[in-house]
Image (cartoon, helix red, strand yellow):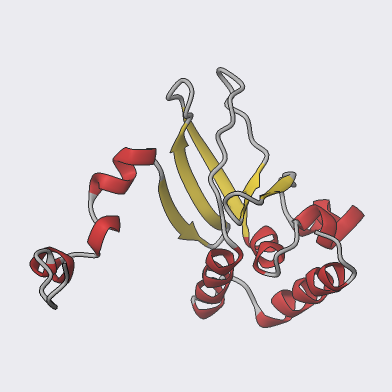
Amino acid sequence: MNRGYDDFDDVINGTAGVFDGSGLVDHDKAKTTADPQGVIVEIACRNCGSPARLVCEYGELIAIAHDVSPQTAYGPQYSQVVREPTNWKFSEANDAWHPDVKCARCRGWVAPMMSSLEARDHVVRAKARGWINEQAVARLSQAAMAARQAGRR
């Protein structure tokens, strides 16, 4: 029964809520940082625990932000847009994208999920920091939007 009192107000107001601290990191053993190259995800394999380091490049994130895979958005030019092209897949169950990356040790699936909204936020922050320029974003966005409008994902 809710009477307008939240027993956890002191915790929520003093932190970033359930996503603060090591709880989320411990749960999935994932850590993300952004740099001029892209969003770096350090994650442990869910099968064997081996560490993996993935770089989601901004060219990939621009396509994901438009809810289309980079390989579909850029076609044969994908390898010219990013340093290491990766096949991205959409998960209907999670309403999010993930790179098709396997663990080097056990070959289990390692890739984290990325929603189109999350990708868009990363692109906006990278532009604000001067890591990617507006012309490049506009050019890649145009290709991604054209693929999406054509019904391709």
Residue 70 in the image: state x and y as whole percent: 76, 57
Kindly give the residue lying farthest to the front in the view shown: 1
Residue beneath the point at 18% across and 65% down: 15
Identify the residue at horizontal 75%, vertical 56% (top origin).
Answer: 69
Is the residue 121 above or below the residue 37 in the image? Answer: below
User: Would you say 85 lies left or right of 51 here?
Assistant: right
Say whether residue 41 is left or right of residue 96.
left
Residue 42 appears left or right of 142: left
Q: Position of residue 128 (x, y in %)?
A: 51, 80
State the quadrant of the N terminus: bottom left
Which of the two residues, 24 or 43, is positioned nearer the viewer here? 24
In the shown orientation, is residue 10 left or right of residue 117? left
Please identify the quadrant where the C terminus is shown: bottom right
User: Relative to residue 7, is residue 138 depicted above or below?
Assistant: below
User: Which of 85/83 is in front?
Assistant: 85
Picture quadrant of residue 67: bottom right
Residue 23 pos. (x, y %):
26, 46
Q: How many discs appear?
A: 0
Residue at 56%, 77% in the rendered image? 127
Figure quadrant of residue 58:
bottom right
